[in-house]
Amino acid sequence: MVIPVRDRADVIGRATAGVLAQTFGDVEVVVVDDGSVDDSVAAARSVSDGRVRIVRQDAAGTAAAITSGIDRAAGEWCLVLDPDDEVSPGWLARLGRLIDATGAGLVSCGGQERHLDGSFTAVEPQPCTVPGDDAALCFRSGAFAAPRRLLVELGGFGGPGDERSPAQVGALLVDALARTPIPDATLLARYATVGGVAAAKLRDRSEARRLLTLARRVEPTTAKHWARWIVACVPVVADRVWEPGDEGTTNADDVQGTVDDRAALDGDGTLHDMRAHG
């Protein structure tokens, strides 16, 4: 999570605390102070939590501050929040469930815009077509999450003289995802199976379940995908079926039939399911 701030001591503490109060606890908050002359840094530091990192820089603009935060973040996925945004407690958990359930390369949600007179306007995701899917997306602060690696490759939000708005960054993300080859269902299911079994052997149970769920969703009529997924959902059974260092076929395959689980992953070891989901 990246929060750029400049002279917003009145709200930055609330925004930071709102992220830390999420029901999804595995989060890092990078607050980037863009040359504030008020007590913004002190307000951010008042939220005493080891998950908060504060980065200070000379005033260079919001876009540069966001890019700096993305570069310094350690998480796999990244979101940007304005210092005056307010978030609901289940916001990150819902986005996380979308990522886990679909393997999407981009996720988005809607929200509300509060006006000075106290009224609200709904902010709804808008239709956006990418190869293989029709999605509804919203490219505003706090409304979309993308892989940090991809944001870094695209240059983040730019910097002085090359500032990019969230909408412009969103367009770049969609274009990058659209240009990424999408494996057919059979190949995608094989990638997901290989990755899921490998994760199970490494005892990364959540990743194993995520990938095996993806295989099941891609080919829902294949019994072997369901068998592996069921095994992965019972840790004590999964640990016995997929023993660390076992390079042969899995016991789950012995039950449901033997398949070759040794297909090659992408060059960088990443499984790509480039469907964007709203």
Image: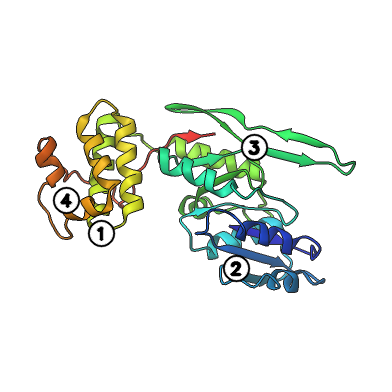
Residue 121 in the figure: left or right of residue 141? right
Name the N-terminal-most of marks 1 and 2: 2
Q: Secondary structure at mark 4?
A: helix
In 3D space, how far apart are the residues under numbered discs 3 and 4 (Cα atoms)?
42 Å
The residue that disc 3 covers is 110
Q: Nearer the viewer, mark 3 or mark 4?
A: 4
Name the N-terminal-most of marks 3 and 4: 3
Q: Secondary structure at mark 2?
A: strand
Mark linked to residue 143: none
Picture layout, residue 273 above or below residue 65? above
Q: Nearer the viewer, mark 1 or mark 4?
A: 4
In 3D space, how far apart are the residues under numbered discs 3 and 1 (Cα atoms)?
36 Å
Residue 155 in the figure: left or right of residue 115? left
Color theme of the render? rainbow
Q: Mark 3: which amino acid?
A: Gly
Q: Is residue 69 visible?
A: yes
The residue that disc 2 covers is 52
Residue occupying the point 68% across, 69% down: 47
